[in-house]
Amino acid sequence: VAGVDPATGDQGLRRVTHSVLADAPVLIEGFKFNVVVARLMELVNATRKVIDTGAGAGDPAVREAAETVAMILDVYAPYTAEDMWELLGHAPCVSRVVWPAADPALLVQDSVTCVVQVDGKVRDKFDVAPTASEAELEAMAMQTAGVIRTLAGREVVNVIVRAPKIVSITTKPAE
């Protein structure tokens, strides 16, 4: 919409939108169509969450996300994308629209969620800096309430850390 600045909208949704905008062309050129569809679903879910949590459909970031979905969806479902594009109030032919460049400032992650598994089951999650080392993640994982509760009466056999997203702990009964 002319005169509406998306920068005034929900910043979390804008981060997801620009992340998808940055990844989609590379994934499409690499024939990773299923990954693009998964990223589109992630964007739609994030948009729905923003709408449901009170910002509403009038949030400029929601419109930016909807336009992004229409542009990327055009690769897979052109008729649906065209209908969506026109419902958003644009002139026909979404396929001729130049994709906007992703804002580099919105691609920087302040934190990521690290999942902690014990014997293959998720026991806890926590937010960390994306630059956290494997040793830091292991130490933080061992101090979470879910892990402490699960490790009671068990001995740690192995710890695998894939920074910054996952810590997997294997145990056996204590002797």
Image (cartoon, rainbow, N blue to C red):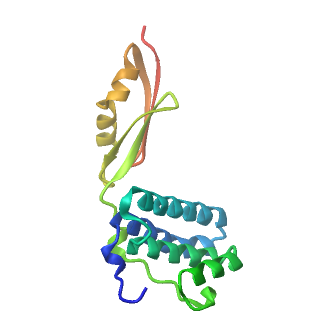
Q: Quadrant of residue 160?
A: top left
Say above or below: 142 vs 97: above
Query: For the image shown, how many numbered marks are present on the structure?
Result: 0
Q: Quadrant of residue 124?
A: top left
Which residue is located at x 54 percent, y 88 percent?
90
Side (left or right) of 50 relative to 81: left
Residue 152 or 2: which is nearer the viewer? 2
Which residue is located at x 46 percent, y 75 percent?
63
Quadrant showing the N terminus: bottom left
Residue 156 or 60: which is nearer the viewer? 60
Q: Residue furthest top?
A: 175
* Residue 152 visible here: yes
Which residue is located at x 43 percent, y 65 percent?
16
Say above or below: 149 vs 55: above
Side (left or right) of 98 relative to 147: right
* Residue 133 visible here: no
Percent position (x, y) of residue 37? 62, 64
Say above or below: 57 vs 5: above
Percent position (x, y) of residue 168? 45, 35
Side (left or right) of 4 relative to 101: left
Q: Quadrant of residue 40?
A: bottom right
Percent position (x, y) of residue 54? 37, 59
Percent position (x, y) of residue 150? 40, 22
